[in-house]
Amino acid sequence: AQKVTQAQTEISVVEKEDVTLDCVYETRDTTYYLFWYKQPPSGELVFLIRRNSFDEQNEISGRYSWNFQKSTSSFNFTITASQVVDSAVYFCALSEARSGGGADGLTFGKGTHLIIQP
Amino acid sequence: SAVISQKPSRDICQRGTSLTIQCQVDSQVTMMFWYRQQPGQSLTLIATANQGSEATYESGFVIDKFPISRPNLTFSTLTVSNMSPEDSSIYLCSVVPGQGYGYTFGSGTRLTVV
């Protein structure tokens, strides 16, 4: 069975600092998908990124970057020059491919509560 | 990506009663997923609902407690039956993404059982 571990329960940094959120996953499938979601205090889930298991390219989107390393089963998320608006709970999640197409439901990590202090 | 309308957005219910949550998607989707998020916790998959077949439940969730209907490719309901205070959670529906997209989630139903 798949598993996602986010060891950091809570991180608090001062605005403009860089911060990295760790995610380690376990799966027996060779084809799987990794995700990061943001859940601000308002409660909605905001999709940030999806990564396929066969695509190990790192990704940068503005102040956000993601480091996917299959060798260590990690998919870490870095926020550069953090801002107060980045304060939220961040979830890493995994789904496995279905035979015949599509994907299973998501397995979520426990989440990291990120607090950006002004 | 798909847009999901979920209702009710919140409800306060008496123990022993049942609540049905509805999710309407603006496009046809093969699979829909139902999740529970207990207070201060992560999301846990309850079941997968395919149109035209019985829902598939995850370990720890049973059909008698969480019956699901999937009458067509754009709609699904989750019922929380015989509720107790332990069922107080946010319930969310979700659909499978298109290529390159993330799973789309409904806005959630915040349920309080008293």
Image (tube, rainbow, N blue to C red):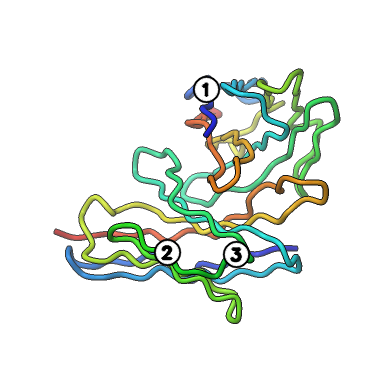
Q: Amino acid at mark 3?
A: Val
Residue A59 marker? 2
Say whether mark 1 and mark 2 are on the same chain.
no
* Residue that carries the numbered disc 1 in the rendered image: B5
Q: Tell me if B70 is positioned left or right of B12 in this view.
A: right
**Helix, strand or loop at disc 3?**
strand
Relative to residue B88, is residue A64 depicted above or below?
Answer: below
Pick whichever, B30 or B85, lies toward us. B30
Instruction: Report the chain holding disc 1.
Output: B
Q: Quadrant of residue A2?
A: bottom right
Q: Quadrant of the C terminus of chain B?
A: top right
**Helix, strand or loop at disc 2?**
strand
**Helix, strand or loop at disc 1?**
strand
Relative to residue B78, is residue A68 depicted above or below?
Answer: below
Q: Residue A42: where, in percent of width, then height?
A: 35, 38
Circle 3 packing at 10 Å, graded few (<14), some (14-19), many (20+), is: many
